[in-house]
Amino acid sequence: MLIAALLLLTAYLLGSLSGSLLIGRLRGVDIRSAGSGNAGGTNALRTQGPWFALGTVAIDIGKGALAAWLGLRFTPDGLSPEGLSATWPYACAFAATLGHVWPVFHGFRGGKGAATLVGGLVLLWPHCLLPTFLAWALALVLGGYVGLATMLAGLSLVPQALFAGDDRLRLGYAVICAVFLVFTHRSNITRLRAGTESRFERVRVFARLRARMARR
């Protein structure tokens, strides 16, 4: 169990290396003091521009994938009871996500975990990536709300796991990811209910088309 504890700790510490805050130090900015105050890719895009946001997302996805790889590579057979050793890669990926949201190196103030969760899924469940992205993109195009789109994309993991078969581990992880993303986006839910949530109007293609047709 010592190896398992070290794996989880290493994964958490990897997750604590926040992409936006590391890049921000190079530029002398802390995006937690700008925009929504969040250290994730969306706030990075809004406050620092696309290249900053791209670097942020790349780091955050990469650390999730690396944490999952550590779980796959270094968890020895027989570490846990029969059939449970497969849980460790998922546990490592989720530990990295916890590190991203509550980073020990950055005062426990991080992002909302979506990119890091995606990084883990790159190795643990790659077949879900395209449907999840399509769910996210459709919700974003229809509504223009990144937070809502992210929550709906996370929730889409549950029916995907159910449709895929009887893999209880994957289904359990899908439920955990979906609930966790709703939890970390609870401030977005509050703003949505109050009508104050920021919106990317440019991506609302259908709404723009309807508006043009209405003016004719």
Image (cartoon, rainbow, N blue to C red):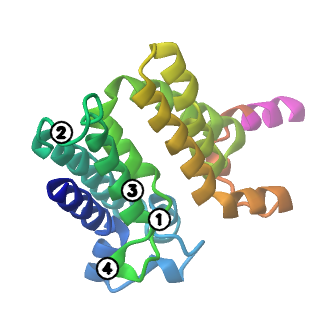
Q: On the picture, is 210 further left or further right than 67? A: right
Proximity of marks 1 and 2: CB atoms separated by less than 8 Å: no
Mark found first going from the N terminus, 3 or 2: 2
Q: Which amino acid does label 1 sit on?
A: Gly
x and y percentages locating residue 141 in the rendered image = 63, 37
Marks 1/3: CA–CA distance: 9 Å
Could you give the CA–CA distance between mark 4 and mark 2, rounded to whole angstroms? 25 Å
Count residues near mark 2 (Cα–Cα under 10 Å), then give few for <14, some for 14-19, many for 20+: some
Q: Mark 2 points at which residue?
A: 72
Circle 3 packing at 10 Å, graded few (<14), some (14-19), many (20+), is many
Q: In which quarter of the image is the N terminus?
A: bottom left
Q: Mark 4 highlights which residue?
A: 105
On screen, residue 41 above or below 39: above
Amino acid under label 3? Thr
Residue 63 in picture, x, y percent from top left: 26, 55
Residue numbers of the magenta segment: 207-216
Mark 2 lies on a secondary structure that is helix
The mark that comes first in sequence, 4 or 1, is 4
Q: Where is residue 161 in the image (x, y as percent from the top left)?
A: 49, 23
* Placement of 4 over or under 191, stated as above or below: above
Q: How many marks?
A: 4
Query: Marks 4 and 3, Cα distance to the nearest angstrom?
Result: 14 Å
Please report whichever mark, 1 or 3, sits nearer to the chain's N-terminal start: 3
Dominant secondary structure of the magenta stretch?
Answer: helix
Residue position marked by numbered label 3 in the rendering: 97
- The CA distance from mark 1 to mark 2 is 25 Å
Above or below, 118 relative to 133: below
